[in-house]
Amino acid sequence: MNTCTKNSDSGIFLRPTPKPDRLGTFFHLLFICCAMVGVVSLATIAWFLFSEGLPAFRQAGVIELVFGSEWLPPALFGIFPMIVASLISTFGAVLIGVPIAILTAVFLAELAPKWLADIVRPAVELLAGIPSVVYGFFGLVVIVPAIEVLFNIPAGNTLLAGVIVLAIMILPTVITISETSIRALPPVYKEGALALGASHIYSIFKVLIPAARSGILTGVALGIARAIGETMAIIMVMGNAPAMPGSILEPARTLTANIAMEMSYATGIHASALYSTGIVLLIFIVLLNAGLLYINKKSVH
């Protein structure tokens, strides 16, 4: 502990110079290095994708590659049908999965008795640990045959099957983060609403959910990122036809499935076209996250 000493000549109390906090400096530098790992990793991945994928953009042309409707390497490299399939499967999963996830989070945080919440919550967390291939196998054995029977079609490996599987896969992420956000709210939010005469359900939907909007949107963003980046389960249930889907009851191929299926044997310009597919996917994810962050900031203000 620093102590003051008295100068015998002037009678002034002098505080000694504190010793440098080397341990604090070390941890400060350690935290900075850890924070930079993510930034450096993203920059390295982006540099690698662009260096490998730009030859395909130069040879095939950006417009022809991004908006072309036919994928027939090594002559045609149109990935627009796969972009459409990725968008439809992702947003279809969001439309189905997010409302279910938010209502489940509200149930766990506000309505469920403790004994029931202690059963449901571990089950939801267990969903997050199931490998993608298991989801795909479940979809192949259960969802695909069910679609065949319900819609009387010859093959159930369709865009709809992919949407349903992805909707199930994003549930644990959105539920866990949304529940945590609702539980983190100060008690005065609900107490104030109840004191003004609002019912419990009204307080949930008009006070708690809007107040937890920032955390819920974060969970939705992470769920979208998982849906659009999913590969194995989609390959198993969606049919993988590199053509423009006419409806959700037709087979389709996503951007990630296209890369996974053909990268093992692709060479030359074909491999470069697959890397350019990764560039399009990376740009799409960055734009999507930026849009969600903007909406999040606007909702806060």
Image (cartoon, rainbow, N blue to C red):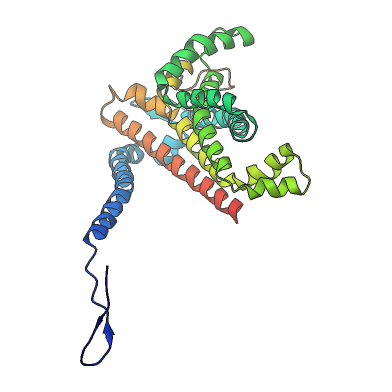
The residue most toward the bottom is 10
Residue at position x 22%, y 67% from top? Answer: 20
Count of marks overlaid on the render: 0
Residue at position x 23%, y 75% from top? Answer: 17
Percent across and percent down for residue 30 are 26, 52
Q: Which quadrant does the N terminus fall into?
A: bottom left
Q: Would you say 234 lies left or right of 50 here?
A: right
| Pick the front one: 208 or 137 | 208
Using the rendered image of the protein, determine whether residue 163 is visible from the camera's viewpoint. Answer: no
Using the rendered image of the protein, determine whether residue 254 is visible from the camera's viewpoint. Answer: yes
Q: Quadrant of residue 247?
A: top right
| Pick the front one: 170 or 242 | 170
Q: Would you say 41 lies left or right of 99 here?
A: left
Percent across and percent down for residue 115 are 57, 25
Q: Quadrant of residue 204?
A: top right
Q: In the figure, 104 relative to 155: above or below?
A: below
Q: In the figure, 111 relative to 243: above or below?
A: below
Percent across and percent down for residue 141 are 49, 9
| Pick the front one: 100 or 136 | 100
Percent across and percent down for residue 182 are 58, 41
Q: Which quadrant does the C terminus fall into?
A: bottom right
| Pick the front one: 101 or 224 | 101
Q: In the figure, 142 relative to 212: above or below?
A: above
